[in-house]
Amino acid sequence: MEFKFEGRAKLITQVLMALGLVALVGGYLTDHSDHHQRWWANLLVNGFFYFSLSLAALFFYALQYITESAWSVVIKRFFEAMLGFLPYGSAVIVIVLLAGQFHLHHLYHWMDTTLYHEFMTVEGGVTTYLDDQVAGAVNNPNYDSIISAKGAYFSTWFFWLRTIIYLFTFLLFAKLFRKWSLQEDAEGGTVIHFKVFRRSALFMVFFAYFSSTLSWDWLMSIDPHWFSTLYGWYLFSGMWVSMIIFAHVTILWLKSKGYFTEITESHMHDLGKWMFAISMLWSYLFFSQFMLIWYSNIPEEVTYYVSRIFTNYKVPFVAMFLINFVVPFLVLISRDTKRNPAFLLPVALLIFIGHFTDVYLLVIPGTMFNHNVFGLFEIGLFLGFLGLFINRTLTSLSNAPLIAKNHPMLQESKDLHY
Amino acid sequence: MKKVFHVMYDDDDKLLVAARELVGKGIHVNEVYSPFPIHGIDPVIGIKRTRLAITSFMYAMTGLTLAVSFMWYTMISDWPMNIGGKPSFSLLENLPAFIPVSFEFSVLCAAHGMVITYLLRNGTFPGMPATNPDPRTTDNMFVMEITTDSNSMNAEELETAIKNTALFELSIKESK
């Protein structure tokens, strides 16, 4: 069965995209913060959040292969469809990083090259930065010894090399997985299945490193004096649960339109279990990071939380944690609520917003400090990206049959009964 | 006087098919003895969903309450402690420090409570007499128990219906 992306659904996503475009232009014109900091920061928040949904779908797809999971075979095409946004998300991230490199904004304080030199000389209005004290040199007031010590990691060529390698790897695997999946539809047999199995294992090795380091490079470096070794996993669990929520809600919608009849209540129950389990994983990692820093109370570590809890961000920060932990824990713990969309949908939508707020609070306190504004621009941009994401996913979904008919474990997946 | 039929099968699938067939004829199956859980048998023979999960939640809440009140007494009330360089002497403000212990104790209580409840409820607590009709059901055989007193059919009709299934062995006992 083929999915046709047309009519009202397509129109709604286009209206959302138009709304996003209006917000993008209007936001830029009305943003009077220095270097349009607010505009760029929100572009990073949305770009990264939706990019991470695609990335998590790529990870989950590979996970199903390396674990030889049968239950998810009927949903496989949906995860493939979510990869449709990956190039767009990558483009937004590259644009934001490039703009930072050319100093159009100041999201990344470490991109300021003057921080890395202890001394400087001023001759005839020309400032030269030096690492060694020569005759006539004075102390550089911008010098930051902590960031300077991380100079090798933050050096321009190394940073861009990493960014290019991440994006290249992800886009390559996304393209190949899709290609092999369609090839399997045409050819059948188990050869392609085992090829994807081996390539997924390879992808996992890359993903294990890159998911951590990309979160350091793109988000943790916003607070360059601070570091947390848990950060990568914490971010990874957040993107994973957001992706599962998006998949669950959209599949429920597709089922209500008469598509995906092979996906039964048991499959939806399994997705619901993922939503519950990964919400708990996220809460666990959030709390592990928080508690160690709270307990040890070391100034260089604790600043991260001080700037989120003892400032304007207190209410969204605490509410975000409570929503993302308590709501799924209390509501999704029961078998019946996981199978009942009337309970599951409101919770899913609520924690989707919760996890967006999580990413928002990773970026904004370190870039806007206590000057943050939350207005129509933020809402419009979120909706715009949501529209683009749904549009790309459903377009990609309509390009291939909904069920991978030659997957060796298809029958087992159809027979899933819980 | 009732008759007890112990119908033995050598495969769980055969038993499942037979159970569906017999239940379809309106026969009530009292119990199934099996070395491992047979997937999908519960709704067929009319066993209600387990409430063990609910007891698990209650045990966990008991554990949580015990752990938090114990820590409140020892570290806040009886001998106030300076936790993590933050001498607030308040349960709420020191809560992050208490979460790991509360979590572990909730899990401990839930796990032990569930195991003990399960063993008691099933009558399989260590030292309890075995209730399975044939020792082979702990090895490689599957037994279905049907009695005349819980069925409206008479013994002959039941026997005919049972013998139509792919059984391995049938033993009929009379009991009060």
Image: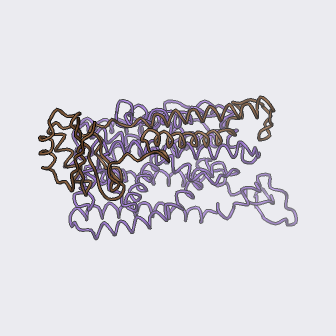
Q: In x, y percent, where is residue A335?
A: 39, 37
Left or right, residue A76 beside residue A39? left
Q: The purple chain is which one?
A: A
Q: In this view of the protein, which residue sits in the foreground, B84 or A360? A: B84
Q: In x, y percent, where is residue A307?
A: 68, 38
Left or right, residue A304 beside residue B151? right
Left or right, residue A114 beside residue A272? right
Q: Quadrant of residue A276?
A: top left
Q: In x, y percent, where is residue A246?
A: 39, 42
Q: Which chain is brown?
A: B
Q: In this view of the protein, which residue sits in the foreground, A313 or A16? A: A313
Quadrant placement of the C terminus of chain B: top left
Q: Is residue A39 visible?
A: no
- The residue under the point 21% across, 56% down is B168
- The residue under the point 35% across, 30% down is A342
- The residue under the point 60% across, 65% down is A158
